[in-house]
Amino acid sequence: MALRLLQHRADDGARSLILADGDQAFFLNGVTTTLELAHAAIAAGNSLAAQAEIAGRGAVVDIAAELAAGRLLAPIDHADPAHLQMTGTGLTHLGSAEGRNKMHAAAAAGEKLTDSMRMFLEGVEGGKPAAGQVGQQPEWFYKGDGSQLVGPEAALTMPAFAQDGGEEPELAGIYLIGADGTPFRLGIALANEFSDHVTERHNYLWLAHSKLRVASLGAELLIGEVPADIRGTSLIRRAGEVVWEKPFLSGEANMSHSIANLEHHHFKYDLFRRAGDVHVHFFGTATLSFSDNVQTAEGDVFEISAAPFALPLRNPLARAAAQDVAVKVL
């Protein structure tokens, strides 16, 4: 059965860690966070699953009820948000070039291939190298630090200057860097990477701007091996009615890059192997409401669900108030 870890915060602020095993879930004894369990597992040379069993299963918990009560957090966090990095890769899924290609096809009139299609095809050709070999590097982007990470049910707030707030249903890998600089994958989580697609469409070189947004993670951290074929649904509710819905595919069977190749091209940089840091790395998607000409609005609720995750990831869309930003000369 699929083992998942969930972080819980009681009404009095006390933190706990939950182990979900199939349809059952239990509080773990003597451990309060995913990060605490991961550090203990690395020190002991154990897997997360083995370390959870050492901690021992305590009281049974209804995770759906705890989600509804607002007591479930993102499945990873760090006491110092500056030591949690959020990054991602694009054009990694079969079919993912279509939506991107539409965004800047006009700008590439007269060219045989757009830059996006060229990068996508290079990934199809070389994104899944044989074991021990290095494959084609993917598109890569930075999203922010831990201050930009929100959990299930929390608002995805776009800046006042944003031209769009659009969902990106996908998987995110969660990593902890060990004391010797070794990256350890703790597991994967459902994610809404959340971007400004109107800004990106204006000029694909503005991708970096469009990605500097908050992002959300589902409550469950799936530990162990990543399923090769993950199938889910992404939808948008407006005033309680579904205004857009579409299936999405992830997992390596549906990707042009292997997860190992994406990991290599992220962690090959020394600055991403700093002991004690946490990384949330978004693996990409091929399914966007924006590609179907949907214009999101404040108050819309994004909902992403996929087995073997038992709980959906839901987040309402909000807009931040405008801020005056002025640089002063000292």
Image (cartoon, rainbow, N blue to C red):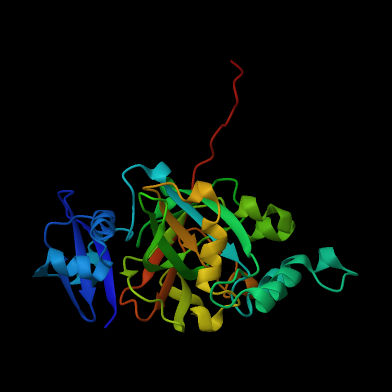
Quarter of the figure that contains the C terminus: top right
Which of the two residues, 68 or 120, is positioned nearer the viewer here?
Answer: 120
Q: Is residue 106 positioned above or below 272 on the image?
A: below
* Residue reaching furthest to the front: 132
Q: Which residue is drawn at 49% across and 46% down?
A: 320
Residue at image point 47% right, 65% down: 192
Residue 39, position as x, y percentages in the image: 27, 54
Can you say whether 76 is above or below 110 in the image?
above
- The location of residue 228, given as percent across then percent down, is 46, 82
Q: Is residue 7 left or right of residue 106?
A: left
* Quarter of the N terminus within the rendering: bottom left
Is residue 71 in sight in this rendering? no
Residue 14 place in picture, x, y as percent? 16, 50
Residue 264 image position (x, y, % from top left): 54, 63
Closest to the observer, 91 or 154: 91
Q: Nearer the viewer, residue 38 or 167?
A: 38
